[in-house]
């Protein structure tokens, strides 16, 4: 059980790093970038956990016939401080200019 908890935590860090590097991504894009691969149900749970903790927000985009969902790092500055401690970076590095 301890090993599974560590894996979940590491996956969360990996997703946050991907969102930091690439900006908003769809769940499909995240599933292609995560190595080793995880199934869509695991990714959905992981994103739900990050969203519940306030680290990630989900927004609708006007692409894919108006049904595009993108995940991005929450742009609230108080959240940036918390995430920056997890990712070992500055809060300024998490600012994604041009994305709301």
Image (spheres, grey):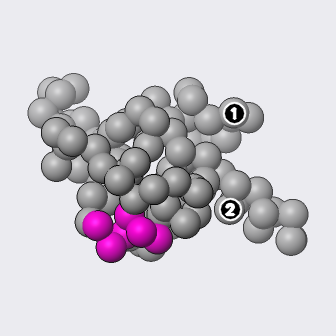
Q: Main secondary structure of the magenta part?
A: helix
Quadrant housing residue 74:
bottom left
Is 76 or 70 nearer to us in this picture?
A: 76
Q: Which quarter of the figure is the N terminus placed in?
A: bottom right
Task: Write the start and end of the magenta stretch as one range.
Answer: 77-82
In the figure, 68 relative to 1: above or below? above
Which numbered marker is on residue 1? none
Name the residue that disc number 1 marks: 35
Q: Is residue 86 visible?
A: yes
Q: Which mark is residue 9?
A: 2
The alpha-carbon separation of the residues under discs 1 and 2 comes to 14 Å
Q: Is residue 29 magenta?
A: no
Residue 28 in sight here: no
In this rendering, the answer to whether 88 lies above or below 26 is: below
The residue depicted at 40 percent of the width and 48 percent of the height is 93
Frontmost residue, 95 versus 68: 95
Residue 90 position, x and y percent, is 45, 56
Crowding at mark 1 (Cα within 10 Å: few <14, some 14-19, many 20+): few
Instruction: Give the side of residue 96 with respect to residue 66, left or right.
Output: right
């Amino acid at each position: 059980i301890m090993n599974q908890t560590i894996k979940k935590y590491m996956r969360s860090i990996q997703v946050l790093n991907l969102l930091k590097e690439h900006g908003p991504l769809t769940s499909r894009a995240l599933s292609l970038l995560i190595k080793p691969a995880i199934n869509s149900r695991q990714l959905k749970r992981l994103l739900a956990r990050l969203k519940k903790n306030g680290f990630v927000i989900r927004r609708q985009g006007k692409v894919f016939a108006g049904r595009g969902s993108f995940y991005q790092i929450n742009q609230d500055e108080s959240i940036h401080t918390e995430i920056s401690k997890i990712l070992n970076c500055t809060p300024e590095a998490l600012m994604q200019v041009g994305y709301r």
